[in-house]
Each structure stands twice: as C-alpha cells, then as structure tokens.
Amino acid sequence: MTTAAAAAKDNTGSGNPAAAATGGETKTAEQIAAETAATAAAAATPAAAAAHKPASTDGQAPPESKAPAKYALTLPDGGRIDEHDLATIEAHARQQGLTNDEAQALVTAHADAINAQSARFTDETKTDAVYGGAQFDSTIKHANAALDILRPKGTPRGDAFRGLLAKSGYGNHLEVVSFLADLGKLMAEDGSYGAGGDQAVSTDAATLIYGTDKAVPAGS
C-alpha cells in the first residue's frame, strides 16, 4: 500500500471516527465537543420544559392563569373579614388563577357563611330551654355584665376579645353566652355588681358592646 493510500485509509477508516462521520472532513476536538453539547441541549430542552410544566389531573394542559398583577379586593361590611383573611383569600385566588371578580366572590361567600353561622347560633341561644325564651333578656344582661367587668370596652384586651367574638360570630354561641351569663350571675350574687345585676346592667347587651340600643348576644 502506498503512503497516499494509507493516509486515505486513516482518514476514512476506523482509525479516525471524526473523519468517518463527516465524510472525510477532519474536525478539531473543540468542534466535536461544541456540536455534541448543542445536540444534547436540543434534545433536553423539551424534556426540561415538560418537567417544569404544571401537571394536570386529566392529562390536559392546565388553563392559563387569569390572575391580575395585583388584586383589588374589598372588605365586606359587618367586620367578618379582616385584612389577614383578605391576604389568605388573595393567595388562594392567585394559586388557582382566579380573576379579581372571582376572588371577590370568595370574600363575599366567606363573610356570608360566617353571618349565617352567627344567625344560627343566635337562634339556638334564643330557643334554649334554660338560657333562652323568657330568660333570654336576663341571660344577655348577665353575660354582658361579666364581659363589661372582665373585658371592658376601650381596653386592649377588652376590644381584642370582643372583636374576636364579633368577627367569628361565636359571641352568639350558646356555650359562650351561657358561660358569661353564669359568671355574671355569680358576680351579682357575690355583690361584684348590683343586686340581681339590675344596677350595673341598666343598659342592654348591645349598648354595652356597641353603644347601640338593640339587644343582642355578647359579641354578635
């Protein structure tokens, strides 16, 4: 074999894979490495995108998020929802990709649910055989007298506790009202406030809590 033929064999045979793969054109190691990296990146890109794509329970692509850049939610009247609740609902709405109107509907629904719960608590207290019926007004007076003495309106603890009862609707719950009422009765018997509670609770429950003239359970 001549020297030229041997050289040709070296360029096209198994002795030079790079030349064999490129039809005889010899490539540098740097060129081969660059092409290999580009090929691997092209192959990996679809897989990487699929790995980071949100999963769907039905195998379909998840819907595009409708969440705005910034929600503008409004607190409903009644004090059932506060800024902390609003932030929690907003975070949930953004996770679900809800519009501002859809998120606001969640806020309203949450407030309505607490209002309905509070109304149910009130009805249960008013109809209770021991604390409701003809005894309801007396129950409320004793309960609010205890509340007014132990957690006075206008004090940090008093306002915080009353606010908690009002926000949750549990100020109307039979177990809360009956506990405060029994405590108020004990205070009356002990002389902590007027005989029978009449002197210290000349105003009704709502006046003690809200400064209004409509009798309602404590913290309603």
Image: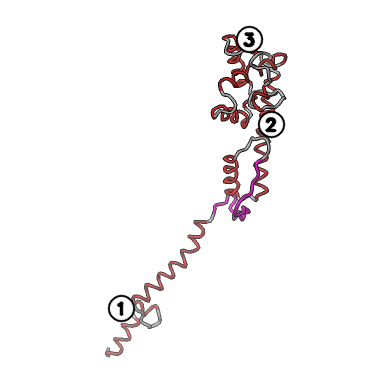
Give the mark nearest the N terminus, 1 or 3: 1
Bounds of the magenta span? 54-75
Query: Hey, what amino acid is under mark 2?
Result: Ala
Element class at badge 2:
helix
Viewer-nearest residue: 63 or 100: 100
**Which label number is shown at residue 153?**
none
Residue 170: image quadrant is: top right
Q: Residue at x 31, y 88 (%)?
A: 5
- Residue 111, compared with residue 55, is above or below; it is above
Q: Could you tell me how many numbered marks the image carries?
A: 3
What type of secondary structure mainly makes up the magenta span? loop
Disc 2 designates what residue?
116
Q: Residue at x 66, y 37 (%)?
A: 111
Q: CA distance from mark 1 to mark 3?
A: 113 Å
Disc 3 designates what residue?
195
- Residue 49, compared with residue 38, is above or below; it is above
